[in-house]
Image: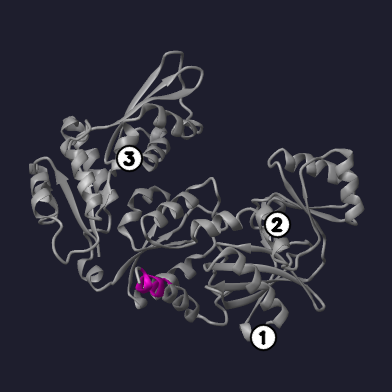
Amino acid sequence: MSNIYLVMDEVEPWAEDLPAGSAISFATYLAEHPIKGQRKTRIINLCNTDRYLSRGYYCSLLAEAREHKVIPSVNTLLDLGNQDLYLLSAAKLLEPLEAPAGDGAELRFKIYFGQVEQPELRKLGRRLFERFPCPLLEAQLSWNGQWQLASIRAFARNELEEAEQALFRQGLESFTQGLWRDPRQRKASRWDLAILVNPEEKLPPSDAQALKRIERAARKVGFHPEFIQARDYARLGEFDALFIRETTEIDHHTFRMARKAELEGLVVIDDPTSILRCCNKVFLQDAFAYQHVPTPRTRIVSGQGAAEVEALEAQFAYPIVLKIPNSAFSLGVVKVENRAELEKQLAKYLGQSDLVIAQEYLYTEYDWRVGVLNHRPLYACRYFMARNHWQIYDHGNGRIGSGGFETLPTYEVPKAVLSAALKAARIIGDGFYGIDLKQQGNRVYVLEVNDNPSLDHGVEDAFLGDELYMQLMGEFARRLENRGR
C-alpha cells in the first residue's frame, strides 16, 4: 500500500491534524528517506517551488531519484517555468469556458488540488490541474475577443490568505481521499486497483451490478479497489493497476489516463496502444486486410465527388454501410439505400473525418461477440438486432433500444468464429477485447475489435458468472507478479 508524506519547508501547526508521521519537513525527507524496506512512497511536495534549485525543486528531484511518486514532478515544474510551452499546451483547455467579458477583462483564480471556488471555472481548473499536476496553482486569463491564458504558476501554501485555508484543506482531503482511511482493510491488500468509471455515461461498458462484482473479485484476488473518475488524473501514481470501465476515445481523458498510468508503471487495461488501434476503424480495416483477417468488402473513402460515388456504386450494391472511423455503440454508422442518401451521408461524415469507411451490407439476425483476454477466449455472446432495426442498438426517436442476447460457453462457438476472433485480437495486443463478427453459413467476417468491451451482469457473465470477473482480476494479478522479472 502507498505510504504518503506531505513534505514542507518546515512542518506547520495545521499539519497536527494529519495522521501521525505523514507531515515531514524537507530536512527530514532529505536525511531520513528512503526508509529501508518501505515501498510505494507517495510525496506531496508543499515546499516553495518558486525558483529553479529551490528546496521545492530539490524535493521533487530527490523523490524521482528515490523512485517515489511525487506531485509536482520535476517536468511539471519545468513546464510551468516555460511560458511558451504552457500557453501552447493550455490553449485548447479554454475552449469550453463561457464567461461574460469585455475587452481587457481579466480573471485570476486559484486551484487547490484541482478544485476551484468559482463554479463557472471548476471544469477549467480541473483541466489545468490535469495538465500541470501541482498542489497549488494560480491562473490568470485575459480577454481579447476570446479567453486566453495569460499566466499560470505554482505558489506556496504560505501565500494563502486566511479565508483560503479552508479551500486548501478541502482540496487536500479530496485529493487524498481513501489514502488514510480503512487502514486495516488496506493493510490486508497486496495491490491498489483504480477502476475508472463515469457515473454520467448513458451507455457505460459495465452496469452497476457488474462493477460490484468486479470490486468483489478484486478483493478476493488481493486488491484494494477504488472507483475513480476523470478528476483523479493526478492520483494515478498511487495505484498499481488501472481498469478502464468508461467508453474510451483518443482525444479524451480515458486515453490520457491510460497513457499516464502506463508511464507511471501501472498494469493497464485498456492500455493506450489498444485504445489507439481499436478506436479508429481505418486502422482496423487496413490491419485486417494486411493480416488476411476475413472482413466484409470494404473501401476507405476520402472524397465525395461524382467519381468516388460511381466507384462505390461499381463496387457495392445498395444498401451500403458508411462508418465514421471513431464510432461506437452503433453511433456514426448508417445504411444508405440509394445515390441521394449516399451523397448526403458522405458529405456529412467527410465533414467530420477526412476518411470514411464504406462496407457491403451483410444481413444477419445477430452479431457474434467473442471476449478475448490475453489471447484466450473468455466468453461468447450472440447479440440480436434491435426490433425493426438493422443494428444491435437503435438510437432513434431519442431513445436507445437494443435487441436480445444469448450467452454461450466458448466451446459451443463455431471453430471458424473463434479462430477469426483470436486472429483479429492478436493484431491489437494482449489485452481484454470484444471482437464483433458476422456469420453467414460457413463464412465468417470480422467487423471490429473493441478495446473496452461491454461487461454487464446477466449478459456477458451469464455462463461464467463470478468466474468471469475472477479471471479478469487474476490476469491483473499475474501481470503484477511478473512485473520486473
Eyeballing the image, is 298 above or below 56?
below
Residue at 35% across, 78% down: 220
| Image spot of residue 245 (x, y percent) | 49, 61
The kind of residue on which mark 3 rests is: Thr
**Residue at mark 1 to residue at mark 3: CA–CA distance:** 53 Å
Mark seen at residue 412: 1
Q: Residue under circle 3?
A: 76
Name which of mark 1 and mark 2 comes first in the sequence.
Answer: 2
**Dot 3 surroundings within 10 Å: few (below 14), some, or many (20 or more)?**
some
Q: Nearer the viewer, mark 3 or mark 2?
A: 2
Magenta-tinted stretch = 476-483
Eyeballing the image, is 339 above or below 421?
above
Q: Quadrant of the N terminus?
A: bottom left
* Membership of 481 in magenta stretch: yes
Name which of mark 3 and mark 2 comes first in the sequence.
Answer: 3
Q: Quadrant of residue 416?
A: bottom right
Is residue 229 visible in this depiction of the protein? yes
224, 456: nearer the viewer: 224
| Image spot of residue 418 (x, y percent) | 66, 78
Is residue 339 visible in this depiction of the protein? no
Give SS at disc 2.
helix
Eyeballing the image, is 12 above or below 104?
below
Q: Quadrant of the C terminus?
A: bottom left
Q: Residue under circle 2?
A: 286
| Image spot of residue 424 (x, y percent) | 65, 68
248, 115: nearer the viewer: 248
